Amino acid sequence: MAAKPTSAARLAAQQPASILDSLVGYRLRRASNRMLSDFSATMAPLALRPVLFAMLEVVRGNPGIIQMGLGTELGIQRANLVPLINELAARDLIERRAAPHDRRAMALFLTPAGEVLLEQADAMVREHEERMLAGLTRGERDKLLELLAKIAAD
Amino acid sequence: MAAKPTSAARLAAQQPASILDSLVGYRLRRASNRMLSDFSATMAPLALRPVLFAMLEVVRGNPGIIQMGLGTELGIQRANLVPLINELAARDLIERRAAPHDRRAMALFLTPAGEVLLEQADAMVREHEERMLAGLTRGERDKLLELLAKIAAD
DNA sequence: CTTGATTGTTATGTCACACAACATTATAAC
DNA sequence: GTTATAATGTTGTGTGACATAACAATCAAG
């Protein structure tokens, strides 16, 4: 007997797999929550939440990006971005500078401290993904990324 | 030129796809959030949030399940379950009855109104999934479900 | 019978969103 | 050039899905 209840085991135990198990939305949420909680645990030493990490990545990849652009890229509304940027700025990980040619906008840059922290984070994230996806082959992971990108595409 | 920025278009536009795009956790969260928001919009007429829907499904599939069991099945802690069950009970969709053989536990059942609402919800959820997964073939959807189930398996 | 675990409950806090309103600045229309 | 409209950052407020700790009642094991 398997230690964990498989579909077969459930049928045998008269615990019919619920309709939920066939819903992509449900399984997505469960998988995402598991990844999120492990991510947070992994990054606890750096005190980097998933959103903050994503923001740093985008800023590194697009130095001088304005807040609006960062929000669009990550699907975060500009109102919600403000306290997050404040947090990163207060920790001296990013810097707000006046944007050229637009006095409304603020251009964002990583500080040296931000660069250093983000490199540490990268390593920890790679390790985190490796651990969580240990059950999937390289090909399966690529396939998964491809399929996820197809869901009501951006 | 494509209407949506592909990886190729990004390179051409000097917007390098960030590391984020290769992270399963990130893409999972994005896809899940999109599904969640469409789910909520779809179910607005029934005022059924994703969690509430999931709870009703499990109760229907397991009549008399106790609160603890429901929480375990859905990965919700019993403390957080209480107000949710209160909400469903207040709307006369589920019923709490004394559990046989255990005077601590409460057995859960769908009310007739709950049965009716859940059937309407089922139809709307099928439609919602169809809309969001229109870009994926049957085979791809099954593959996606299979891969999601493999992520740091329950 | 006593000790420890389980169940439901209350209370509290955090995080990732959503939406509305506002001042400042850009842009477009005229 | 002036005026109307849009964009940007900001503040404030609300919500939904989590987490954790503590408690009373009940169960189960020694």
Image (tube, coloured by chain):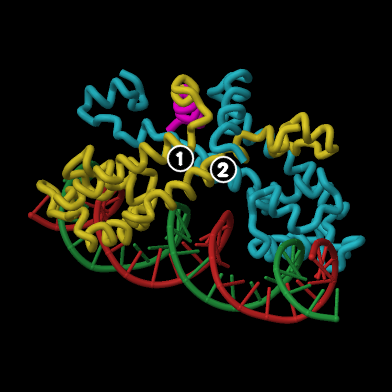
Chain colours: A yellow, B cyan, C green, D red
Residue placed at 53% from the left, 23% from the top?
B135
In the picture, the disc for residue B55 is none
Q: Which residue is mark 2?
A: A29
* Chain to which the residue tagged by mark 2 belongs: A
**Camera-side residue of B46 and A115:** A115
Quadrant for the C terminus of chain B, please.
Answer: top right
Quadrant for the N terminus of chain B, please.
Answer: top left
Mark 1 and mark 2 on one chain: no
CB contact under 8 Å: marks 1 and 2:
no
Question: Which mark lies nearer to you, 1 or 2?
Answer: 2
Position of A76 with respect to A29 (left or right) is: left
* Chain to which the residue tagged by mark 1 belongs: B
Residue placed at 47% from the left, 42% from the top?
B29
Let me know if residue A79 is in the magenta part: no
Quarter-of-image position of residue B141: top right
Q: Which residues are magenta?
A: A143-154
Q: Which residue is mark 1?
A: B30
Query: What percent of the width, then of the height, locates residue B33?
Result: 50, 43
Residue placed at 20% from the left, 47% from the top?
A116
Q: What residue type is disc 2 on? A: Arg
Marks 1/2: CA–CA distance:
10 Å
